[in-house]
Amino acid sequence: MAQRTDSFDVGALLLSSGEGRRLEVEVPVDGFDFGGQRYEVPGEQVTATLDISHTTNGYSVRMRFKTAVEGPCMRCLEAAGHEVSVDAREIDQPGGGEELSSPYLEAEELDIKAWARDALALALPTQIVCSEDCLGLCAVCGENLNQAGPDHAHEREPDPRWAALRELKLD
C-alpha cells in the first residue's frame, strides 16, 4: 500500500552516492484552470512511482504516473476526459547553477504535490476535447454543432461594403 504524502524527505532514505530507491506514493493533485476552464483529477490523487538516486552532491529524481483529467471540452463545452501519462525528471546538484537546481527539492525535502501538479499541466495537450472530430459551437447561435446536424445554417449577413446600395430608391 502506497502512503499518501505532499512532500518527502529524501535524506531519510540514507542513500550513499550512486545508490537509488524506488517508492510508490499517493500524491494529492488539486484541480486547476486550463484554457479558461476548470479540470479535476478523479479522486483528487494519483499513485506515482518515484525513483530517487543520490548523486555525488545531490539527487536525481523521476516521477511517473497515469491519470485521467475531467472537465469541459474546449470546443463544445460538453464533458470531456483525457488520459495523461506523466514521466518527469528533476536534478538537484548544489553549486551546479540554475540548470542543476530543482525548484521542488529544498534541503532534501521533495515537494511531490507541487511537482505532480506542474508535471501534469505540462503533459496535457494544447486542447482537451471530447473527440478529435468535435465540431464545437455555432458562432452565430451557440448551438452544439455535433448535435445540430449538417442542415444547421443561418442566413448570411449582407456584405457591409454594399450597404450604400440599400439606401438607393428606384422608382
Image (cartoon, helix red, strand yellow):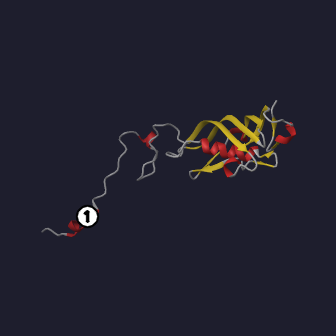
| Figure check: 160 above or below 141 | below
The residue depicted at 71 percent of the width and 37 percent of the height is: 62
| Figure check: 98 above or below 44 | below
Residue 29 visible in the picture: no
Q: Can you give x and y, in whole percent of width and height, for residue 150 in the image? A: 37, 39
Q: Nearer the viewer, residue 8 or 148?
A: 8
The residue depicted at 69 percent of the width and 51 percent of the height is: 97
Amino acid of disc 1: Arg
Residue 64 visible in the picture: yes
The quadrant in which residue 159 appears is bottom left
Q: Can you give x and y, in whole percent of width and height, for residue 29 in the image? A: 72, 44
Q: Quadrant of the N terminus?
A: top right
Q: Quadrant of the C terminus?
A: bottom left
Q: Is residue 87 left or right of residue 153?
A: right
Q: Can you give x and y, in whole percent of width and height, for residue 120 in the image? A: 65, 42
Question: Mark 1 sits on what residue?
Answer: 161
Q: Can you give x and y, in whole percent of width and height, for residue 149 in the image? A: 40, 39
Q: Nearer the viewer, residue 96 or 67?
A: 96
Q: Is residue 90 left or right of residue 148?
A: right
The residue depicted at 74 percent of the width and 50 percent of the height is: 95
Q: Nearer the viewer, residue 81 or 158?
A: 81
Crowd band around label 1 with a 10 angstrom C-alpha radius: few (<14), some (14–19), many (20+) = few
Q: Is residue 169 left or right of residue 54?
A: left
Determine the residue located farthest toward the left in the rendered image: 171
Mark 1 residue element: helix
Q: Is residue 52 left or right of residue 135?
A: right
